[in-house]
Image (tube, helix red, strand yellow):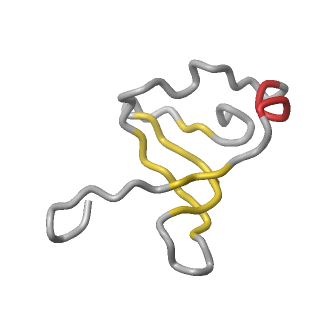
Amino acid sequence: MQENGKTVTWGVEGMSPNYLSRRGWSKNTFKPGDKITLTIRPMRDGSPGGMFVRGILADGKPVTFAATEP
């Protein structure tokens, strides 16, 4: 959310579904409405988006390209 109170939609890219499924991800890894804190590599041009690096679910569970960390 911006300082003026408006919501900004960000585009976040990741790896292919095949790559992610081989690392434990499923269509239920993130569900609509999940609260998640993301770490991304931002777009070079400053637009709202970037590449997924890792996430932390509301319950504290980390999510990476390996699905979960040991």
In percent of the image, x 15 and y 62: which residue is there? 5
On the rendered structure, is 59 left or right of 43?
A: left
**Which residue occupies the foreground of this view, 13 or 58?**
13
* Residue sitting farthest toward the left: 4
In percent of the image, x 63 and y 20: which residue is there? 27
- Does 43 sit above or below residue 67? below
- Residue 31 point in image, percent of width and height: 47, 24
On the rendered structure, is 16 left or right of 8?
A: right
Q: Quadrant of residue 53?
A: bottom right
Q: In which quadrant of the rendered image does the C terminus lie?
A: top right
Q: In which quadrant of the rendered image does the N terminus lie?
A: bottom left
**Which residue occupies the foreground of this view, 20 or 7?**
7
On the rendered structure, is 50 left or right of 8?
A: right
In percent of the image, x 84 and y 29: which residue is there? 18
**Which residue occupies the foreground of this view, 65 or 16?**
16
- Residue 67 point in image, percent of width and height: 68, 32
In percent of the image, x 84 and y 35: which residue is there? 19
Q: Quadrant of residue 4?
A: bottom left
- Residue 13 point in image, percent of width and height: 65, 51
Q: Quadrant of residue 29?
A: top right
On the rendered structure, is 14 left or right of 43?
A: right
Q: How many marks?
A: 0
- Residue 24 point in image, percent of width and height: 74, 23
- Does 44 sit above or below residue 20? below
